[in-house]
Image (spheres, coloured by chain):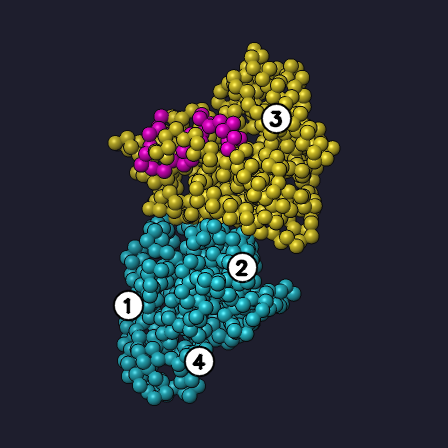
Chain colours: A yellow, B cyan
Amino acid sequence: MVPHLVTALTGPLLDLEEKIIAATPAIERWFRLEWQEHTPPFYCSVDLRNAGYKLAPVDTNLFPAGFNYLATEMLPLSVQAAMAAIDKYCPDARNLLLIPEVKDRHPRYLENIARLMQIFRQTGLHVRLGSLSPEITQPTPLALQDGNMLVIEPLVRSPNGRRLGLKDFDPCTILINNDLSAGIPDILQNIHEQSLLPPLHAGWALRRKSNHLTAYDEVAKKFGKLIGVDPWMLNPFHAKCDEVDVHSGDGLDCLATNVDALLAKIRKKYKEYGIKDQKPFVIIKPDAGTYGKGIISVRDAAELKDLTAAQRERMSIIKDGKVVSDLNVQEGVPTFESIKDSVAEPVVYMIDRYVVGGFYRVHAERGVEQNLNAPGSQYMPLAFAQQHAVPDVKAKPGTAAPNRFYVYGVVARLALLAASLEMERTDPNPEVY
Amino acid sequence: MVPHLVTALTGPLLDLEEKIIAATPAIERWFRLEWQEHTPPFYCSVDLRNAGYKLAPVDTNLFPAGFNYLATEMLPLSVQAAMAAIDKYCPDARNLLLIPEVKDRHPRYLENIARLMQIFRQTGLHVRLGSLSPEITQPTPLALQDGNMLVIEPLVRSPNGRRLGLKDFDPCTILINNDLSAGIPDILQNIHEQSLLPPLHAGWALRRKSNHLTAYDEVAKKFGKLIGVDPWMLNPFHAKCDEVDVHSGDGLDCLATNVDALLAKIRKKYKEYGIKDQKPFVIIKPDAGTYGKGIISVRDAAELKDLTAAQRERMSIIKDGKVVSDLNVQEGVPTFESIKDSVAEPVVYMIDRYVVGGFYRVHAERGVEQNLNAPGSQYMPLAFAQQHAVPDVKAKPGTAAPNRFYVYGVVARLALLAASLEMERTDPNPEVY
């Protein structure tokens, strides 16, 4: 079941990992206390990059798909965490309404939806699917590849307009698995009697990566202090340029300046830590939303002058036709992990405050510096069986796979905590949510 | 890993099970709402007897041993539930003090202690062992069969007398795994600043089975109404006789009357439900504490006159030399489950409100009506992988093992809820705990 992970299972424990493992009691206590103050997102997945010398989250997804890639043996962990989450929002819940992506009918995405329905059914809820698509005007079957059938139904507002549901189905919890990058549909607005999770401002119509990165800076700083490591070990440098138009060239100066400044900072850190076999690079990402699209990798500001038409196209068009204007420049973190000859990056899944599983995203045709969330990627489920474990600190380096998984769970939870701060601070209407 | 359970895996779904499975959403919601009102015991194990026509808890243990028999693959479920529990009592905890049995040095019991320490270490706590024995005056090693070593240390009250700990170890949570049947030691008295779990009145020095049975009557009645079944399906009849002295014969009249009355009530139920191949019997148990000792099985009140000296001895002496006086008479529930040719009964483990695993207690030399918690019993861990599952109601009878495990988890949680009510109602000092 667990694939042979060339590095995760055989590589030596890194200095950072050793420090995290040694500080486990302090770390777990710190998380407990943080969760007294902040509410974790209902669910979340975090893409990590492990460069050996640093381990950092590179994407924090508040509408996670991919639950179908988690090891089925570990499903009870998801169910237990979902029970805790439901208990918090809606103890008297009978029904949960799940709103999936509108256009994604890929068999793998439908399997994710089926898995989420299974998890919440197993907490004892009635679970049904509601569609944001105007084309769904009646219950519509969606065939899964295994022969099972899902049914998606039109959303209905209650006669008094205050509640959202389906025909004869009044949910307490409405769980959104649609990242809302196309905007916030009217039918989701002004719902105050039900738990709409995550809140609407988590959607890419409103959410901005830069807010998350700022919150993460703060979390990484506190955590770095807690365990006595340079926060850079956990946090890529980043900067932001507003209103860049890669076609006209407006704003490219800002981009070039930031790229140069970041590369210089990275070079300095590489020198400080004796990192010699890695050449600094940065990633440029749109501030609003992505499906792994609109991302380019740059080693020198000069490359910005020579962007190909295709690259410009990639940067300007992201999901649902929204044109890029605000761009983040972020330190590139190569992955040093591979499975057979393919580069791999870990993805960690959480429900409420709990790590419930993860997998490796593997791409045979991509390099160690490239974004792996791209067509052709494969998924290797990991049981993450010991993900909560205080690993055996006496284990010989390289013999204790769970060590690495625990560390992944810690860094993913740092991103989770940052998402929690981000959601608090960007809440347009704090007293409503 | 999962042993071949002749009945659990191949037997048809029983009427009661079908009703429980069909009512899952209502049941889970009801539990959620009950846990809003009542605090579950920190941990608990429940012995069940499945007679086919009825499924009932027969022992609710608030100081559960046997965590070592749970399937290791399912350990993350225990860790996650323990995290939730610690979070509730002591979010700022760094240290947990575990107090084991004083005299039990059986390798299996030490493995239970080692497993509990592992679970709580994996929540990120420092865990150490404290001894109630005056013989432990310095840190003392306890060898495990696998070659590892535990260390047990003398308990120390803080200089101001308000806190309990070890030398240089001040715990927030004190977890007792000693059933206190020998009385409540002075060193555990008047601890108000720390979480002493379970509370002292859960110990057999104070606890009485009859209080639990009364609370369970109430829970079973509510639950029976919820799912539309006769509560008798889940609850053995019972009665109590105070101050029985089996040696002098004082109080034996009460016992005989109750035995006769119970047997008559059972016969009536058997007739009502067409149970023909089972002859009614009752179990007589001391009201205070047991290790499976002091229990006898009776088919006719006349047998009470002919108790052998050995039976009288068994009934009068229970753990740590306490003489029996108050006795419970309880409807006997035979087990219809077996593994190979041995009779088996399921035991379900819970931490906080969560089912975290279970096993079958199997005894090759005992009959279907006998107590299996006796020397010679063996333990077959069950993954209980789907214990939370709303089972697949469309599964053909006999094909879906998880169905039965879910039902076991439900009935065990009924006993857990009864224990919660029992603890509330018997609390000698409600404002302290």
Give the chain of mark 1: B
Amino acid type of disc 4? Gly
Give the chain of mark 3: A
Please state the extent of the stretch shown in magenta in the rendering: A186-215
Is A213 part of what is drawn in magenta? yes
Q: Which residue is mark 3?
A: A283
The reply, left or right, for residue A312 in relation to residue B46 is right
Relative depth, front residue between B280 and B147: B147
Q: Is disc 3 in the same subunit as disc 4?
A: no
The reply, left or right, for residue A207 in relation to residue A399 is left
Give the chain of mark 4: B
The reply, left or right, for residue B299 in relation to residue B132 is left
Is B132 part of what is drawn in magenta? no
Amino acid type of disc 2? Phe
Position in image of residue A69 (x %, y %): 55, 41
Q: Mark 4, residues whose alpha carbon is within 10 Å: few (<14), some, or many (≥20)?
A: few
Q: Which residue is mark 4?
A: B321
Q: Pointer 2 and pointer 4: residues touching (CB < 8 Å)?
A: no
Q: CA distance from mark 4 to mark 1?
A: 42 Å
Relative depth, front residue between A65 and B86: B86
Nearer to us of marks 4 and 1 is 4
Q: Mark 2, residues whose alpha carbon is within 10 Å: few (<14), some, or many (≥20)?
A: some
- Above or below, A64 against A310 in this view is below
On residue B272, the disc is 1
Q: CA distance from mark 1 to mark 3?
A: 75 Å
SS assignment at label 1: helix
Position in image of residue A405 (x %, y %): 60, 46
